Image (cartoon, grey):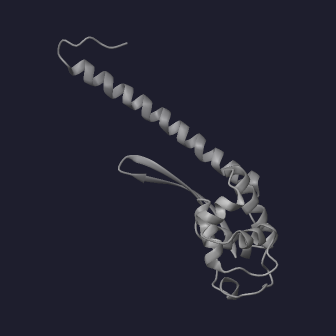
Amino acid sequence: MVHEIGVREVRKGGGIAVTISCMAERGTSAVYTARGQVDGEDWPAVAAALNERMAARRVGQQELARLSGISVSTLRMVQHGASRRVQNKTLEAIARALDWPEDHLIGILVSAGQARPAQGQVEDQVVTVLNRIEQQLQQLGDRLARVEQRIQAEEPGSAPRA
């Protein structure tokens, strides 16, 4: 599995859109559909991510089970690092209920041992893009001020605004 952090600027119609993305390329393997434990799966990582999200969102087991349409016992099993493989649709339902992309927990599960970008690298890239955006906004503000001055100067009988 290859992880990439992408930061790019896209210029559209005179405007600027910035896209910050984290993409993972995954091959389809037995990991996605197999029942029972599969080598390379990281159930403790899934449990940690799930428990952190539940705590951050202040969602209890009963409520998350209801929102995701699974039993409390199945949810509890995933929260404790599942000793057996649960179905993908179960992980997808939990992810949806927590406002994650549908494949988020599956991605965590199968990314065991894979290199992930260091948090500092991601933060540096984001800061660089945000600085660039800030500079461009300042330039746009300056241009807008000049346009407003020209419009006011061309209007007959108009007094300049402060």
Residue farthest toward the left in the current orientation of the protein: 156
Q: Quadrant of the N terminus?
A: bottom right
Residue 60 sits above or below residue 159 on the image? below
- Frontmost residue, 111 versus 125: 111
> Residue at 47% of width from left, 50% of height from top?
17
Horizontal relation, residue 139 to residue 42: left or right: left
Q: Position of residue 121 (x, y in %)?
A: 73, 54
- Frontmost residue, 59 versus 102: 59
Residue 57 sits above or below residue 135 on the image? below
Residue 152 sits above or below residue 25 on the image? above
Q: Position of residue 69 (x, y in %)?
A: 60, 70
> Residue at 70% of width from left, 88% of height from top?
34
> Residue at 82% of width from left, 78% of height from top?
83
- Frontmost residue, 22 versus 47: 47
Q: Quadrant of residue 113?
A: bottom right
Total of numbered circles in the picture? 0
Horizontal relation, residue 66 to residue 143: left or right: right
Q: Quadrant of the C terminus?
A: top left
Q: Position of residue 131 (x, y in %)?
A: 60, 40
Regarding residue 23, the answer to whether it shows in the image is no
Q: Position of residue 105 (x, y in %)?
A: 68, 69
- Frontmost residue, 113 versus 147: 113
Q: Quadrant of residue 147?
A: top left
> Residue at 33% of width from left, 14% of height from top?
161
Regarding residue 14, the answer to whether it shows in the image is yes
